[in-house]
Amino acid sequence: MVKKANSSEEELRRKQILEAALDCFLQFGYSKTSMDDIAKKANLSRPLLYLKFKNKEDLFTEIFNYLLGGRYESSEEVLKTNFSPKEKLIQISEILLIEPWAKVAGHPMTSDYYEACSRLSPKVMEKYERFIIKSVQTILGDKETAEVFFLAMDGMSADLPTVKTLRKRMKVLIGKFI
C-alpha cells in the first residue's frame, strides 16, 4: 500500500514538473527557460529537478511525450469503431491535433515551442507523424492520400490559430477528403 501511495505521489510530482516546464517554455521559449525557472515554477529545488530529469532537453522531450500520453491508444480505439470514415477522421484529429493544440495555443512562445519540438525531439515527432499517417491510411485507404492529409493537417496550425479556428479548419479539410 505504501508503494502505491509513493508511486502516485511520484506521478503527481512528475505531472506538476511537466506542467510547470510547459508553462515556462510557452511563456519564455526554450532557450530563455532555465532549469531554475522550472524548479521555481514547480515549487521544488533545482537538485530535485535534476534527480527527475537529467537536463532541460530531456525534460522538454518528456513534455512532448506527456502531451501525447494516451492519445495513440485512444486513436486506435476510434479506428476500431463502426463510425463513418468522416467521423473517425474528426475524432482522430480531435485527439491527436486539437486537444494537444489546446494546451499550447495562445501563449507568447507557442511558435518557438513547436519549432523546438522538431529540433529537440525528432524521434518523438517522427513517431507522432508516422502514427497519424498510419491511422489516416486505415481510414482513407492509401498511404499517399494519408501523407497529403497529414501535411495539410500539419499546416493548419502554422499561423497559430485559436482552437475554435483549428477545429473549423479540420472539418473543412476532412470534408474535402471524404
Image (cartoon, helix red, strand yellow):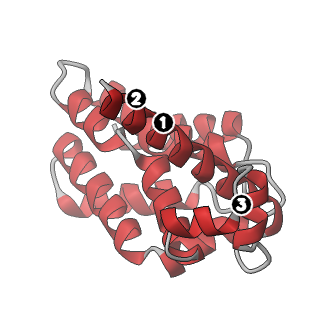
Label 2 element class: helix
Please name whichever residue, 12 or 58, is drawn nearer the observer in this view of the structure. 12
Sequence-earlier tag: 2 or 3: 2
- Badge 2 vs badge 1, beta-carbon distance below 8 Å: yes
Please name whichever residue, 103 or 25, is drawn nearer the observer in this view of the structure. 25
- Residue holding disc 1: 9
Cα gap from disc 2 to disc 3, whole angstroms: 23 Å
- Asked if one can make out residue 52 in the rendered structure from this viewpoint, the answer is yes
Rendered image: mark on residue 5: 2
Residue 39 versus residue 178 in the image, above or below: below
- Asked if one can make out residue 159 in the rendered structure from this viewpoint, the answer is no
Direction from residue 14 to residue 74 in the image, left or right: left
At 69% from the left and 51% from the top, the residue drawn is 20
- Residue holding disc 3: 39
The location of residue 81, given as percent across then percent down, is: 19, 21
Tell me where residue 127 sits by quadrant: bottom left
Residue flagged by tag 3: what amino acid is it? Answer: Ala
Neighbour class for label 1 at 10 Å: few (<14), some, many (≥20)? Answer: few
At 34% from the left and 29% from the top, the residue drawn is 2
Please name whichever residue, 57 or 81, is drawn nearer the observer in this view of the structure. 57
Tell me where residue 89 sits by quadrant: top left
Cα gap from disc 3 to disc 1, whole angstroms: 17 Å
The location of residue 163, given as percent across then percent down, is: 67, 38
